[in-house]
Structures are given as C-alpha cells and as structure tokens.
Amino acid sequence: MSKTIFITGASRGFGRLWAEAFLERGDKVAATARNIEVLNDLKAKYGDAILPIALNVDNRQEAFDAVNKAAAHFGSLDVVINNAGYGLFGAIEEASEAEARQQIETNVFGLLWITQAALPIMRKQGHGHIIQLSSILGVFTLPVLGIYNASKFAVEGLSETLAQEVKGFGINVTLVEPNGFSTDWAGSSSFHSQPIEAYDGVKKAFQEGLTDDAFGVPEATIPAILKLVDEQNPPLRYFLGKIGLPVTKELYKARLEEWEKYADVATTAHGK
C-alpha cells in the first residue's frame, strides 16, 4: 500500500536518493528544498506523485506552511522524514557564535518546527511515523565535530522524549543513526570554522583515523529506509552502516565500567 511521505532536504544526498526511491515504488512524496528547481527532473518523471515545496527549515512559519500544504494536497501524512541538516567542522574553541547558533538552528530547531507542525495532523489521523535523521555522532562523539555532535545529541533527547509522549496517539518515532557515507555531507554541504593552530594535531589525528572503509555507499541505504517506513512497529533507534553498533557496544561497556567504579559515591550522594 502506497504511503504519503514528507521529506526535508531532498535536493541531494540521502534526501534525494530516498525521495526518488519512494516515488519509484509508487509512494506520494512532498519533497522540500531551498531551491526546488533541483527537483524539476523528478517532477517531470513522476508528475503529480511529487509535490516540490520551497522551504528553509530555520523559518518556523515556513515549516508549518510546508507541512500543512503537503497534508492538504495529498489528504494525509503517513511519514515525515526530518533529513535537512549539515555539518560544522572545527574544534569547540574555534566555533564562532554565529556558526554555533546556526548549526543548532538548522539541525535542532528546524527539525523541531517540522515535527511540531506534523503532530496535530497525525494525532487527528490516529497514525503516523516521524523519522529523525540523527547520526552515530548523536550516540557517541568525535573530535572536530563538537557543535554537530551537540546538535545530534539534542535530536536524540528530543526524539526519545517525543516517542513517549505520542505513542498513545498511534504515532511512532524513529531516530536514524547513519555512520559516514560517501555523500557530499563533508564536502560542499559542510562548513568549517576559522582554524586555531593549536588544534592542528587533533585534526591531523582525526583525518588519519578515517579510512575509505569507514564510509558507506549511499545507495545501499535505500532498502533499509524502505523497510523502516513499512514497519508496523518501527524501532526507536535504527543504525545505518556497519560502524555504529560495534563502536557503541565498546563505548557503552567503558561507560558502564566507569559508572560502576563510582557507584558507591553516587549512592551516598543521594542522601537517604
């Protein structure tokens, strides 16, 4: 059975790949981008099955207008995918106020506005699935991406809370947590803070730790995302790629060991 899917950031990367995969199998797609001319080829190929919508997710009113337009046009919204976002590279000290605020504005508030806009529609329907594009860097961190890490940790906390609040309305929430993929996320889509020489060593070590094998093939995610939107009882968390799970297991083992080491101190601090 075909679904009606709203997806942000559909101009390139995962958003573009997934939007076309949905259309190819017969779903209806509201696809947003800052410049919808990049979606002209999809419109020409799939006709009325796609509704291109110009959107800057940073603008709350635009976000609400876009979601409501999609729902009115197609009559329902089965799935909302918050895919829009970008990476800011630089040490914590290097990030300017404007860079830090803009990273959170887009990656967190943009996602929040779309989510808030979709919820009344899905509550009225009695069903829906909100898919939030997080990252493995919302589960653990890497240096040189601290502000981005912070934005994805915020998405994790927001979405885990949301899942508890809306389950009774028939609305599911999933955090998709990809590892690195060979998109332009780290290329033309990214931003870099003004460097401070003291961090050159950290950045060199970071770069040397990256291997070609660490980056997945974007097209290989298509079956996984199709499976996710078709799940009757979708999971809260969903890794994409082979890196996330083994690294998370090791890191959580170390965290638990550290917490256990200070368990007596923690209990005493409770006071009763």
Image (spheres, grey):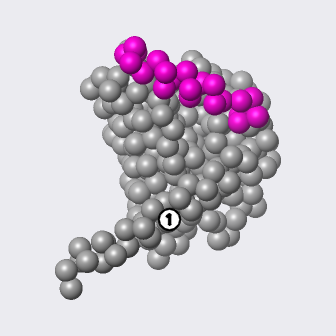
The stretch in magenta equals 195-215
Q: Residue at left 38%, top 73%? A: 263
Q: Residue at left 69%, top 41%? A: 18
Percent x, y of residue 77 = 56, 55
Q: Quadrant of the N terminus?
A: bottom right
Please tell me in which quadrant of the rendered image residue 245 appears: bottom right
Please tell me in which quadrant of the rendered image residue 188 appears: top right
Percent x, y of residue 50 = 65, 38
Depth check, front residue: 268 or 69: 268
Q: Is mark 1 on a helix, strand or loop?
A: helix
Percent x, y of residue 152 = 46, 45
Residue for badge 1? 257
Q: Residue at left 42%, top 21%? A: 199
Specify the principal SS of the magenta part. helix
Q: In this view, does 229 lie to the left or right of 55?
A: right
Depth check, front residue: 214 or 52: 214
Depth check, front residue: 193 or 256: 256
Determine whether 21 is above or below 185 in the image: below
Instruction: Tell me, yes or no, if residue 109 can be seen here.
Output: yes
Determine whether 8 is above or below 229 in the image: above
Q: Which amino acid does label 1 sit on?
A: Glu
Q: Quadrant of the C terminus?
A: bottom left
